[in-house]
Image (cartoon, coloured by chain):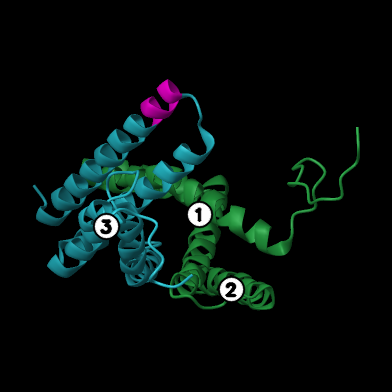
Chain colours: A cyan, B green
Amino acid sequence: MGSDVKLRSALGRARGLGSAREGVGHFYAQRATAIGMIPLSLWFVISVIGLTHADYATLLDWVGQPLNATLLSLTVLTAMYHAQLGVEVVIADYVHGETLKFTLLTASTMAAFLLGAAMVVSILKVAVGV
Amino acid sequence: MTKRDRPLSPHLQIYKMPFTAVLSISHRITGVVMAVGTLVLAYWLISAAYGPDAYATAQAVLGSVPGRLLLFGWSVALFYHLCNGIRHMFWDAGMGFEIRDAVKSGYITVGAALALTILAWAIGV
């Protein structure tokens, strides 16, 4: 199919949105977070391996490093965002009842925010050591 | 009824899934598994925030045999989803759509995921 084939109205093209009303936003965010997760997940796995037998003091030392606390928070937030985008697609594909679908989409979004907040607060608490 | 010779959509209960289809649904399954698996990560981090005793309990739970099995499953899901995600990025870039290429990249994905899992646990244990 050539680029001269026009399936959308001029207004539709100018707005850049589709039937989902958000254009390629979801698609793009899923890929952007996926690219971010490549180095972050590898860093995370290597770090966790290093912490396998760590006692509490060692953990405090490690999370207390600003770089580690930053990357750990970034990993958690990117992972929750990416997971939420993926779960949304899965729910949209397999759940057909409108009420149940709406409920699950809302609940999964809330769960992602809740888990993200809880993990970042935990990381900060360990890092700052209050 | 006249019998028409035209393709049928797969009847999932009696359909032998092709290799590439198994890999495709596995990407979703491992993704959902990890989304649920973030609860384990949350448990570990929140325990650390609650102090040395809670952290020691979490380390003992995750270090037990069921805990290690859980983490092993988690790592398999992570490495598979990571490798197959990279395979998806090649498709997004318009590469590797021929069935032969898709099967080949599928084998590379499974091989790389296995290698990374074995490597991680060889270093970690």
* Chain letter behind tag 2: B
Q: Is residue A99 magenta?
A: yes
Percent position of residue B70, x then y: 53, 49
Q: Amino acid at mark 1?
A: Trp
> Is residue A112 in view from this perspective?
yes
As measured in the structure, the alpha-carbon distance from the residue carrying label 3 to the one carrying label 2 is 28 Å
Kindly indicate whether the residue at mark 2 contacts the one at mark 3 (C-beta within 8 angstroms). no
Q: Which residue is mark 1?
A: B74
Prevalent SS, magenta region: helix
Give the camera-side residue of A97 and A84.
A97
**Residue at image mark 3:** A13
Q: Position of residue A2 (x, y in %)?
A: 44, 73
Q: Which residue is mark 2?
A: B97
Q: Residues within 10 Å of mark 1 (few under 14, many from 20)?
A: some
In this rendering, the label closer to the viewer, 1 or 3: 3
Number of callouts: 3
Q: Amino acid at mark 2?
A: Phe
For badge 3, the amino acid type reads Arg
Magenta-colored span:
A98-104
